[in-house]
Image (tube, grey):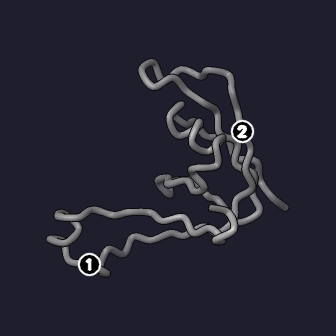
Amino acid sequence: MSNIIEKKILTEYFNKIISGEKTYELRLADWDCQPGDILVLNEIDTDTKQLIGRKLRRKVGYVGRTKDGSFWTKEEIEKYGYQIISLLNEEQE
């Protein structure tokens, strides 16, 4: 059974998801999310953080979680940071 989970999202990222440019979501893992759940993203104003009224729904696919930063040294992380990469089929370009 899938859950419906509501979260807030800034307009900039909301629009990128709507356009299809952004196909992932990076969140603090302080709540449970499983493949098959429905994520409802509620757009909020960048300055006031108040709800704007637009919503979008997306089905959760893969959920990756980690606390392990031992892939790289602390120095490498401080120098380069992390990047999250969404992988699409070549036909989706």
Q: Amino acid at mark 1?
A: Trp
Q: Quadrant of residue 2?
A: bottom right
Residue 18 shown left or right of residue 84 in the figure: right
| Residue 76: percent from left, percent from top | 19, 72
Residue 68 shown left or right of residue 58 in the figure: left
Q: On residue 56, which mark appears?
A: 2
Q: Residue at x 66, y 71 (%)?
A: 89
Quadrant in which the C terminus appears? bottom right
Could you say whether the residue bearing mark 1 is in a helix, strand or loop?
loop
Vertical order, 55 against 37 (above or below): above
| Residue 38: percent from left, percent from top | 75, 51
Q: Quadrant of residue 17?
A: top right
Q: Residue at x 44, y 63 (%)?
A: 84
Residue 49 shown left or right of residue 61 in the figure: left
Q: Quadrant of residue 9?
A: top right
Quadrant in which the N terminus appears? bottom right
Mark 1 = which residue? 72
Could you say whether the residue bearing mark 2 is in a helix, strand or loop?
strand
